[in-house]
Amino acid sequence: MDSQELNKDPYIKLFWVTVIVSIFAFFTLSTVAISSVKTYEICFSYQCLNFFFSEVMLVPLTSLAAALPICAIFLTLHKSQQTKIQIVQSSNQNKTANFFMHRKEFAELCKKIEEKYPVTINWQEIYNKIFFNNINNDKVNLSYDSSLSDYFSLDENCLKLFDSLSEMNGEVDTGGAIGLLHELDRIDSTSGIKLQLSGSVKRFFLKDEMADIGIKHYMPLKLVNGSITQTWELYFNIMKELAFFSGTTFDYEKPINSLGRYNYVLYQKGRIVENEGD
């Protein structure tokens, strides 16, 4: 316990007040008691000493003796207060150690994911989104709290889109397929997980053509093997690993394999192209 906390301890203050008051009272009462004796002479006999301590100094010594147990009580309370503060300090130190260890382990997980998948991960950004209270080290949460963060909850529009596409029973809707691509682009820019153009991940373009006025627009895409489904599966696998570390789950109840048919309709209609300008 440092000097500042020591000065704030009320029991140590009461201890010193009791000591000072008892000493002051002792000398005051002793002066009054000694001055009340009519005759003065130096005597060290048993009778004289007995008279002096048992009669003249009875009240001053009694007041001084009474202060001793009071001081002992305040010292005991002070020790208890000191132990309590030490426990709090130790808890804060453990909390801080857990905070930095937790961040380190999360960073190491993200590094392993980067080695496993063709992505780069902004682990600080993701960590602050998942463990919201840990940003200022005020309250360390070692598990995900959905009341503080919605990182592992798919956007409501995205869920509705997945549900509607999964329930089409083989019917293909071009607008829905394009919606999947826009959701992938949004996640790539907001989730802290970015696909890298390497290996199976290649650059494609979503072609938007207004034939009546001759305007073409090409939205850049990053797709795994040119597949919408495989790209979503890659994203889902990464989110599952992050969720497992965070003490929660990331699941979409309906299978997304059926979404593969949306690749074909876009390719067949020339909406996904390999080169800008095709």
Image: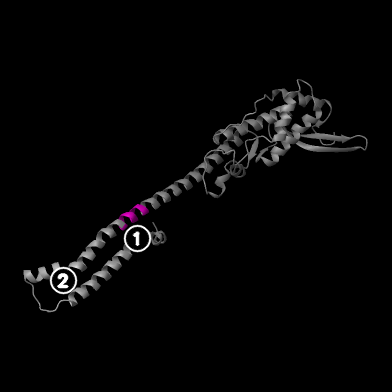
Residue carrying label 2: 56
Please name which of the two marks, 1 or 2, marks the residue nearer to the observer: 2
Crowd rating for badge 2 (residues with CA inside 10 Å; few <14, some 14–19, many 20+): many
Residue furthest to the right: 212
For residue 228, above or below residue 84 = above
Give, as a three-letter code, the residue at label 2.
Val
Which quarter of the rendered picture does the C terminus lie within? top right
For residue 207, above or below residue 259 = below
Q: Is residue 5 left or right of residue 161?
A: left
Compare residues 38 and 17 and report the one nearer the observer: 38
The mark nearer the N terminus, 1 or 2, is 1
Crowd rating for badge 1 (residues with CA inside 10 Å; few <14, some 14–19, many 20+): many
Compare residues 248 and 27 and report the one nearer the observer: 27
**Which label number is shown at residue 194?**
none
Q: Is residue 205 left or right of residue 232?
A: right
Compare residues 160 and 73 and report the one nearer the observer: 73
**Which label number is shown at residue 12?**
1
Q: List x then y, in percent, for residue 208.
A: 84, 35
Q: List x then y, in percent, for residue 76.
A: 31, 54
Highlighted magenta segment, given as a residue range: 74-81
Q: Is residue 38 left or right of residue 69?
A: left
Residue 75 in the magenta stretch? The answer is: yes
Residue at x-position 24% and y-position 62%: 66
Residue 94 in the magenta stretch? The answer is: no
Q: List x then y, in percent, for residue 250.
A: 61, 31
Q: Secondary structure at mark 2?
A: helix
Q: Secondary structure at mark 1?
A: helix
- Which image quarter: residue 221? top right
Evaluate whether residue 135 shows in this view.
yes
